[in-house]
Structures are given as structure tokens and as C-alpha cells.
Image (cartoon, rainbow, N blue to C red):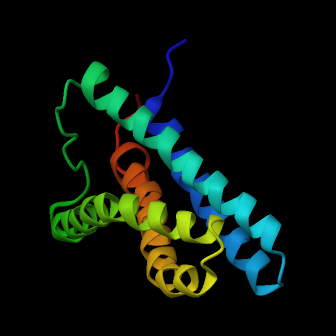
């Protein structure tokens, strides 16, 4: 049995997205500790994703990109989503760290200010990560 790292990565992205939604719900209800646990867990899940993604790229596919297997007319849409996903995934690392640190240190005014930027970007990265997996490995991919 081999470990399907792309599936693991999609599950990690999906889990991170669910934790982000739960964290938002908790803070809207005034449940700060539950919010903090969800957001730190989302960050930890994203870190595990990053390690798993790098392992897959370095040791499994040796950095080779997976070609888009879908219809040609959808390729521009897919490439646009992939490009924005990658750019925003890079940007979210310092944003999430800064947001979490400000929250933990109790600098709530600054935390709220940056969280309004961080949360939607992080959510987009999580959701598009799952969509990219589906596009590459499930929807149009031949049976593996």
C-alpha cells in the first residue's frame, strides 16, 4: 500500500478550511479560546500540508509539475486558479504568522485589523488547494 500524498494534501487543505470557518464562527459568538484553538490548529494543519507537499514534490515526483488533464478550454481557468493559489499561498505564511502572534500577545486591535485580510486569503488558498487536487487527480484523471 502506498500513501497517496496528493489526497493527504487535499484533506489537509480541507481540514484547514473547516478549522478557519469554525474559528470565525467561534469568534463571532465571543468564544475566544475556541477561536484561538481553531486558528492555531488551522496553522498547524497548513504547516503539515507544506511538509507533505514538499515531500511529494522532492521525493515522489522530483519537482515535475502535474499537467492539467482536463479539457483545453478549461486550462486558462485552471492556470489562473493555480497561479493565484500559489501566489497567495506564499503570501499567507507571513500574514498568518503575524495574525496569530498578534492574537496570542493580546494585541487584539491589530489582530482584528490584519485578520480581516488574512482570513479570506487563507480560506481561498485552502479551498483552491482542494479544487486543484480534484481537477488534477479526480475529475479528469484516468484511473490510477
Q: Quarter-wise, where is residue 94 in the image?
A: bottom left
Q: x%, y% of residue 98?
A: 46, 66
Q: x%, y% of residue 139?
A: 41, 52
Question: How many marks overall?
Answer: 0
At horizontal 40% and vertical 68% (from top left) the residue drawn is: 95
Extreme residue in the top direction: 1
Most foreground residue, 101 or 17: 101
Most foreground residue, 64 or 45: 45
Q: Quarter-wise, where is residue 28 in the image?
A: bottom right
At horizontal 44% and vertical 82% (from top left) the residue drawn is: 117
Q: x%, y% of residue 44?
A: 58, 46
Q: x%, y% of residue 93?
A: 39, 58
Q: Image check: 107 left or right of 92? A: right
At horizontal 22% and vertical 40% (from top left) the residue drawn is: 66
Most foreground residue, 103 or 134: 103
Q: Image check: 138 left or right of 11? A: left
At horizontal 66% and vertical 72% (from top left) the residue drawn is: 21
Most foreground residue, 65 or 95: 95
Look at the picture and state if 141 lies above or below 121. Answer: above
Look at the picture and state if 14 lies above or below 57. Answer: below
Look at the picture and state if 68 lies above or below 125. Answer: above
Q: Image check: 123 left or right of 107? A: left
Quadrant where the image shows the C terminus: top left
Amino acid at each position: 500500500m502506498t500513501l497517496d500524498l496528493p489526497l493527504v494534501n487535499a484533506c489537509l487543505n480541507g481540514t484547514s478550511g473547516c478549522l478557519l470557518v469554525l474559528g470565525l464562527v467561534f469568534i463571532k459568538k465571543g468564544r475566544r479560546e475556541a477561536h484561538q484553538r481553531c486558528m492555531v490548529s488551522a496553522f498547524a494543519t497548513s504547516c503539515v500540508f507544506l511538509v507533505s507537499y514538499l515531500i511529494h514534490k522532492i521525493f515522489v515526483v522530483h519537482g515535475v509539475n502535474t499537467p492539467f488533464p482536463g479539457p483545453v478550454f478549461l486550462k486558462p481557468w485552471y492556470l489562473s486558479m493555480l497561479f493565484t493559489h500559489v501566489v497567495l499561498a506564499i503570501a499567507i505564511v507571513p500574514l498568518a504568522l503575524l495574525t496569530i502572534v498578534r492574537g496570542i500577545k493580546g494585541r487584539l486591535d491589530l489582530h482584528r485589523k490584519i485578520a480581516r485580510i488574512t482570513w479570506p486569503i487563507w480560506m481561498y488558498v485552502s479551498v483552491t488547494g482542494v479544487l486543484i487536487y480534484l481537477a488534477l487527480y479526480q475529475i479528469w484523471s484516468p484511473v490510477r
